[in-house]
Image (cartoon, rainbow, N blue to C red):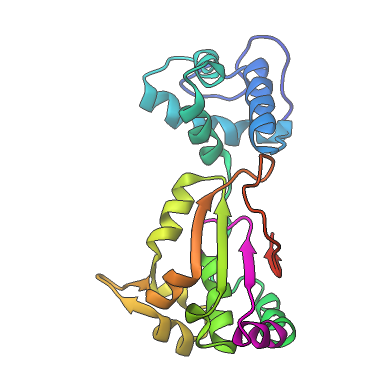
Amino acid sequence: MNVAAGRGSIVEGEFVFTADDFRHIAEMLHAHAGIALNEGKAALVYSRLAKRLRTLGLTSFRDYCALVEGVDGVDERQKMTAALTTNVTRFYREPHHFDDLRDRVMPELAARARAGGRVRLWSAACSNGQEPYSMALTVLQALPEAADLDVRILATDIDPNMVAQGHDGTYSEEALEPAPVTLWRKYFDRADRGQWTAGAQLKRLVSFKELNLIGDWPMKGKFDVIFCR
């Protein structure tokens, strides 16, 4: 889609959405989260943020931009970022990565942990938790006593809604299917209505935190493994 100049709407819908509105939102998103939006994303931006305008009772994208950019706009900036972030994740996504973690990396890390050493892994864009829990299952496969040793997995994401879902750790059986069945049935507890919740050992291994990767990182120690996919 070519973004037209001037004050006319560039997307058909109930709200006027001008080229200036799109540029303004794209600049704010890039400054806040480092995410670059090209002009072809105008329809996507409109469809996702129109819901926010309705929720807030606003009548124009110009008013929305003013709200987000204003002194009281911190909370809405987070909601805007969450709305415009595409969370693509699944258990054992690109399984060869987890094979490599298990077969090439974990033997040395397991030996270190058993000797009393520190082991740290980081899922830097964890979405709703399926990646860090896949990492935890892989760690437990190689080191069943990991939760009792100095082994921890940090899971971070810019979207607080995704962080909350990961912390809750509840997933459908369908979502868990890509994971080795003997592992997830061992470390997840059955919940209601076909749902499964991360068990005690997984919860002890994985900590969820909100983090904007282009902001300040509070972590001081080194990591042995970083997944940033």
| Horizontal relation, residue 137 to residue 3: left or right | left
Inspect the magenta stretch and tell me whether residue 176 lies in it. no
| Horizontal relation, residue 63 to residue 218: left or right | left
Residue located at (57% from left, 39% from top)? 84
Could you tell me which quadrant the C terminus lies in?
A: bottom right
Q: x and y percent of residue 82 in the render? A: 52, 40
Residue located at (70% from left, 69% from top)? 225
Q: x and y percent of residue 174 in the render? A: 42, 73
Q: Is there any visible trace of residue 65 in the rendered image? A: yes
Q: x and y percent of residue 67 in the render? A: 50, 17
Inspect the magenta stretch and tell me whether residue 123 lies in it. yes
Q: Is there any visible trace of residue 199 in the rendered image? A: no
**Residue 89 figure quarter:** bottom right
Could you tell me which quadrant the N terminus lies in?
A: top right
Residue 81, relative to residue 167: is it above or below? above
Which of 140 and 146 lies nearest the eye of the viewer? 146
Q: x and y percent of residue 200 in the render? A: 37, 75
Residue located at (67% from left, 72% from top)? 94
The outermost residue toward the top is 7
Which of 114 and 227 lies nearest the eye of the viewer? 114
**Residue 5 figure quarter:** top right
Q: Which residues are magenta?
A: 107-129
Task: Count the labels in the image.
Answer: 0
**Residue 46 figure quarter:** top right
Residue 184, relative to residue 56: is it above or below? below
The outermost residue toward the front is 116
The outermost residue toward the left is 192
